[in-house]
C-alpha cells in the first residue's frame, strides 16, 4: 500500500535534510513531502515572529494545500514539538505520527522548563544565543562529537555548513498533551541507539519515547542523532514499517 509521508525537520535544519529519505520513500512507491518551517531561508520570517503556532500552521497549511489525507506525519528532534501540535489541529488527516529520536512534550510545563536537566555542560557551552536572545546556534565541535559523530568529517562539514540559527521561542510554549493523547492517533518512535546530543541516549528512549502511549518502535543500532544523513535508507524503511503497524 502506498503511504503519504510528511516530514518535519528539527532545530537548525530545513526541509533539505530529508532529501535522501524522501528519495528512498519515493523509490519504493510512496509519496513524500518535507516542510520548511518558518525562520529559515526556505521560509523566511523574523525570529521575533516565530513561535510554536507559526511552525504548526506551516505544516497544517502545507497538508491542506496539497490536499493530503491519511498522512504519516514524522518529525525529527525538535520537530516532535511541531508534529504533536499538528495532530491537535487536523487529527482527521493524520493516520500515524512518528517521532524520530525526537522531543515529546511533557504533560505539564514546556520543553524549555526541562532544558536545564537535558543539556550537558558541553552542550550548554557550545550553544550560542544571539544578542537579542531570540535565536541560537550550535558550535561545530559539539556538533561533530554529539550530533554526527557516526559520520565522516566531510559529511559533518557538509551538514554543518547548511545549518541556520534557530528561533528559541517555540520550546517555551506548552503543548496540551492530554488533549493529544485523547485523540488516539497511533504513535511510533524511532530509537537511535547512540544518540549523544544530551549525553545519555536514555534521555531519548525511554525518556521522551516513554511519554507516548504504547508506541510501536524501531531501533537503529549504533546510530547517532542525524539518522537522515547517516542512515537514509534504513530511516525510510523504518518509516514504511511503522506506517504499516
Image: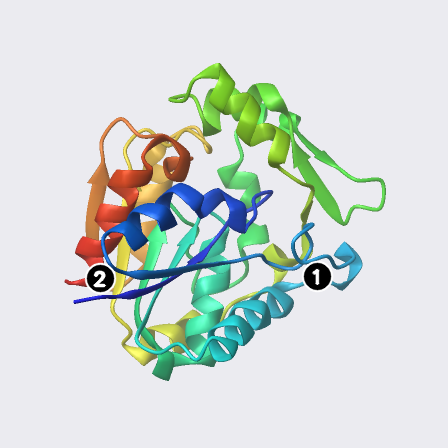
Q: Is residue 216 visible to the viewer in this orientation of the structure?
A: no
- Percent across and percent down for residue 174 are 55, 65
Q: Is 111 drawn above or below residue 57 in the view shown?
A: above
Q: Are marks 1 and 2 in contact (CB under 8 Å)?
A: no
Disc 1 marks which residue? 50
- Residue 111 left/right relative to 178: right
The residue shown at (41%, 22%) is 151
**Quarter occupied by the C terminus:** bottom left
Q: Is 40 drawn above or below residue 156 in the view shown?
A: below
The residue shown at (41%, 56%) is 104
The residue shown at (32%, 58%) is 98
Q: Is residue 238 visible to the viewer in this orientation of the structure?
A: yes
- Residue 240 left/right relative to 127: left
Q: CA distance from mark 1 to mark 2?
A: 31 Å
Residue in front for this viewpoint, 242 or 66: 66
**Quarter occupied by the N terminus:** bottom left
Q: Is 183 drawn above or below residue 84 in the view shown?
A: below
Sequence order check, earlier mark of 1 and 2: 1
- Percent across and percent down for residue 14 are 56, 48
Mark 2 surroundings: few (<14), some (14-19) or many (≥20) residues within 10 A: many
**Total of numbered circles in the picture?**
2
Q: Secondary structure at mark 2?
A: helix
Q: Residue furthest right?
A: 131
- Percent across and percent down for residue 190 are 28, 47
Disc 2 marks which residue? 243
Residue in front for this viewpoint, 18 or 132: 18
Residue in front for this viewpoint, 21 or 23: 23
Amino acid at each position: 500500500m502506498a503511504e503519504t509521508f510528511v516530514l518535519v525537520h528539527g532545530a537548525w535544519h530545513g526541509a533539505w535534510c530529508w532529501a535522501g529519505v524522501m528519495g528512498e520513500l519515493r523509490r519504493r512507491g510512496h509519496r513524500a513531502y518535507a516542510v520548511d518551517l518558518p525562520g529559515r531561508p526556505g521560509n523566511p520570517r523574523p525570529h521575533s515572529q516565530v513561535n510554536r503556532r507559526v511552525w504548526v500552521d506551516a505544516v497544517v497549511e502545507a497538508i491542506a494545500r496539497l490536499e493530503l489525507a491519511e498522512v504519516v506525519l514524522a518529525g525529527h528532534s525538535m520537530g516532535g514539538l511541531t508534529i504533536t501540535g499538528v495532530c491537535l489541529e487536523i487529527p482527521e488527516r493524520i493516520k500515524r505520527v512518528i517521532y524520530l529520536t525526537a522531543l515529546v512534550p511533557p504533560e505539564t510545563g514546556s520543553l524549555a522548563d526541562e532544558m536545564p536537566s537535558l543539556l550537558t555542560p558541553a552542550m550548554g557551552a557550545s550553544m550560542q544565543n544571539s544578542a537579542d536572545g531570540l535565536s541560537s546556534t550550535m558550535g561545530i565541535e559539539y556538533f561533530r562529537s554529539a550530533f554526527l559523530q557516526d559520520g565522516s568529517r566531510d559529511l559533518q562539514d557538509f551538514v554543518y555548513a547548511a545549518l541556520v540559527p534557530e528561533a528559541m521561542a517555540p520550546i517555551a510554549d506548552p503543548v496540551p498533551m492530554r488533549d493529544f493523547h485523547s485523540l488516539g492517533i497511533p504513535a511510533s518512535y524511532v530509537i537511535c541507539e547512540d544518540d549523544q546530543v544530551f549525553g545519555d541516549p536514555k534521555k531519548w528512549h525511554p525518556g521522551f519515547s516513554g511519554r507516548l502511549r504504547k508506541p510501536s518502535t524501531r531501533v537503529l543500532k549504533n546510530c547517532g542523532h542525524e539518522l537522515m544523513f547517516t542512515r537514509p535508507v534504513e530511516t525510510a524503511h523504518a518509516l514504511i514499517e511503522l506506517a504499516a503497524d
